[in-house]
Image (tube, grey):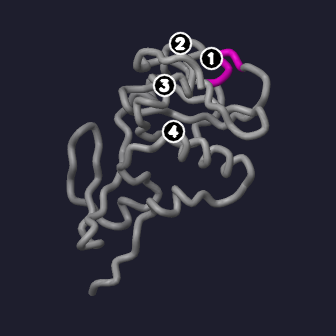
Amino acid sequence: MGKKTNKQAVGDVVRIPLAEGRHGYALALVPPLFAFFDCLGGDELAPADVISRPVLFRLWVMDSAVTSGRWPIVGRVEPPPALLAAATFFKQNALNKRKLTIYVGGKESPATREQCVGLERAAVWDPAHVEDRLTDHHAGRPNKWVESLRLEDSLEE
């Protein structure tokens, strides 16, 4: 682990340690949101090179990822406007799986299943789970954390 640091600011680029000495990168957006990029390697990338890569996903992440030093800040860039737009997530009622909402910019509205397909579930991710997800993505295998948060089928009629 790195040294303890302050909370990330919008535009901070963080390096994420992964297996075998490799690492990925993310861009801090409006806390606790990060954008994760499709890059994996052992060599350091300049922050401008990081944000030129395709975005894999955007997730809320626990502050401890950065404040603990686990994900060191390696630079700062001006975030692309598209990434500053509010992220859209879905929520699914634990007791009534048919009750769905879409969460955008702090506001929730009722949603259909079709509107929720392809969205991330509203959840704050543990840094270790994000690291697992990035490792699994680059290995081409399913991720147990993604599967556990997948939109569930309604068994009710």
Say whether residue 31 is left or right of residue 150: left
Please tell me whether mark 3 or mark 2 is closer to you in this view. Answer: 3
User: Do the numbered discs 2 and 1 sit on residues whose CB atoms are within 8 Å?
Assistant: yes
**Residue ID at (48%, 20%):** 79
The residue range painted magenta reads 45-50
Is the magenta region chiefly helix, strand or loop? Answer: helix
Residue indicated by mark 3? 68
Q: Residue 31's x, y, as percent?
A: 36, 28
Going from N to C along the chain, the mark reached first, 2 or 1, is 1
Residue indicated by mark 2? 76
User: Do the numbered discs 4 and 2 sit on residues whose CB atoms are within 8 Å?
Assistant: no
Say whether residue 91 is left or right of residue 78: left
Say whether residue 137 is left or right of residue 66: right
Depicted 68 relative to depicted 145: above or below: above
Marks 1 and 4 sit apart, C-alpha to C-alpha, by 20 Å
Which numbered tag is attached to residue 127? 4
Q: Say which quadrant the C terminus sits in.
A: bottom left
**Residue ID at (62%, 17%):** 47
Marks 2 and 1 sit apart, C-alpha to C-alpha, by 7 Å
Depicted 99 relative to depicted 154: above or below: above
Question: What is the count of numbered marks?
Answer: 4
Amino acid on which the number 4 mark rests in the picture: Pro
Amino acid on which the number 3 mark rests in the picture: Ser
Going from N to C along the chain, the mark reached first, 4 or 3, is 3
**Residue ID at (48%, 39%):** 58
